[in-house]
Amino acid sequence: MLNRWKTQIFIGFSLVVAAAIPIFTGGYFSAERAQDLESQGEYQAAAQQYAQAARWAFWRTDLAEKAGINFAKAGDFTASVGTFERLNKPSAEGWVWYCTSYIQLQDFPSAISVCSKGAENEKTPVLYGLLAYVYREQGDFSAEQNTLENQTRLDPSDAYAAYRLGMLRMLSAPENAVDELTRASTLNPEVDSAVQTLTFAVAVAEAQSDLSMKKVIIGQAFGLVQDWELAQEAFTQAVQLDETNAEAWAWLGEAKQQNGQSGAVELDQALRLDRQSVNVRALRALYWNRQQKYEQALAEYLLAAGIEPQDPHWQVSLGDAYTKLGDLVSALSAYQRAVELAPTDAEYWRLLAVFCAENAVQVEEIGLPAAQQAYTIDPNNPAVLDALGHSYFLTSRFASAEKTLMQAIEIDPGYFPAYIHVALTYLSQGNQPAAYNALTFVRDADESGAYASVAEQLLSKYFQ
């Protein structure tokens, strides 16, 4: 009897073990296969294997998390979110991918919720960085600043976080911005130029007694470093502080245009408030230029020049507007008037030379002498050397052109217009290999694409 009972127990235990073996082995082999696929970059397949392994070995929560991570790496963010939602407590890496998946799905409220919980649990700078990004996308700059304060406290070595925090402090507490911006410049010297622009703006703004104009100055600095979202916020605050500030309205209109909005309403309001402001007129002219309504732009510049007749800047603007309207006679007169007003400024002589060169207007008689005068004033300026070299090229002085343009390149190896002009010079001299090398350099090195496009056209024309 006892033996029969022992036999039954043994049989029952064997059946349990037999049933459990596929669970253990299935989970093991799925996990092993998933690791191999992940190492090969096959993230979607790896995620599916991890998910299968998690179903077999249900007590191993790390497998489900790995499935969620690999779904995210594969770009299947919906599956990733669905996987993470079933986890009780992700790891620090899991929280990062969970948050990232919601960001990729553009579900910012959920991203804020997940990132906040993850940051609260794990206290990692990466999660605070992701949360700051979401707040920026939402335009919640106050929350972004608070988040960056936490991020930089945890990771003082992040140059971008320091730079961004410094900019946000310029809006909320300018007196605390400079130290953070300086730290960012120390961490990453590439932002040094932008930091100089921003810190100078802080100093100018602090010397300004008008609170609204303080914000305008800060916003202008943001525009100079190409952060038009923050610029728009600064100009909005300026308008809120003083609704009669015409320049604040005009700059708000400019920022809105830069951010893909109209800006016309703000510019019209600026004009209603102050018809004699040259800055309002200039910003309205920019608006009309973007609409390709050059007659309206010309009218604005004429009014600005009438208000400030001794400012050469308005004459150059008039020259540009006349050029776009095809009135080259009036354009030449405007550029010449600019150099009369500022005879010791190389830039206005250069612009006169460039106008003549680009429009084939009296290059020999006016353009080349203007470029030479610019060179006399500022001989080490690559833009001046380029204008002079191009003028030499257009007047068939090829040896002088090559020498001058190579000087420009030696001073600034990244000044792409000089490469274009020296390539044209080489082509005129029959030096095809040198021209090809110059053009391919621009094509491959110009990240903005403006000069790369010109180089590509010349390569197609002369080397196909």
Image (spheres, rainbow, N blue to C red):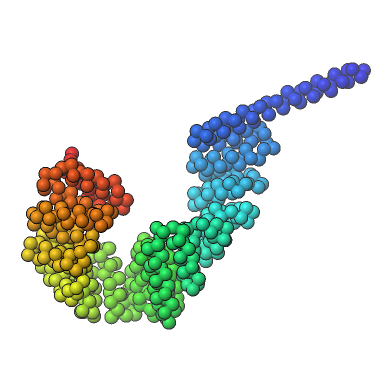
Pick the front one: 26 or 85: 26
Q: Position of residue 337 (x, y in %)?
A: 15, 74
Asked if one can make out residue 183 in the rendered structure from this viewpoint, the answer is: yes
How many numbered marks appear? 0
Determine the residue positioned at 11% across, 59% down.
360
Q: Position of residue 348 (x, y in %)?
A: 19, 69
Determine the residue positioned at 23% across, 60% down.
382
Pick the quarter of the image with the N terminus.
top right
Left/right of residue 315 with respect to residue 202 in the rendered view: left
Classify 130 as above or below 352.
above
Pick the quarter of the image with the C terminus.
top left
Q: Position of residue 229 (x, y in %)?
A: 42, 63
Left/right of residue 437 with respect to residue 211 in the rendered view: left
Determine the residue positioned at 39% across, 76% down.
204
Determine the residue positioned at 12% across, 55% down.
400
Residue that protrudes farthest toward the bottom in the picture? 209
Left/right of residue 157 with respect to residue 331 in the rendered view: right
Pick the front one: 311 or 371: 371
Q: Position of residue 366 (x, y in %)?
A: 9, 66
Residue that protrudes farthest toward the left in the picture? 365
Pick the front one: 90 or 275: 90
Asked if one can make out residue 328 in the rendered structure from this viewpoint, the answer is: no
Classify 165 as above or below 434.
below
Classify 381 as above or below 69.
below
Left/right of residue 244 with respect to residue 275 in the rendered view: right
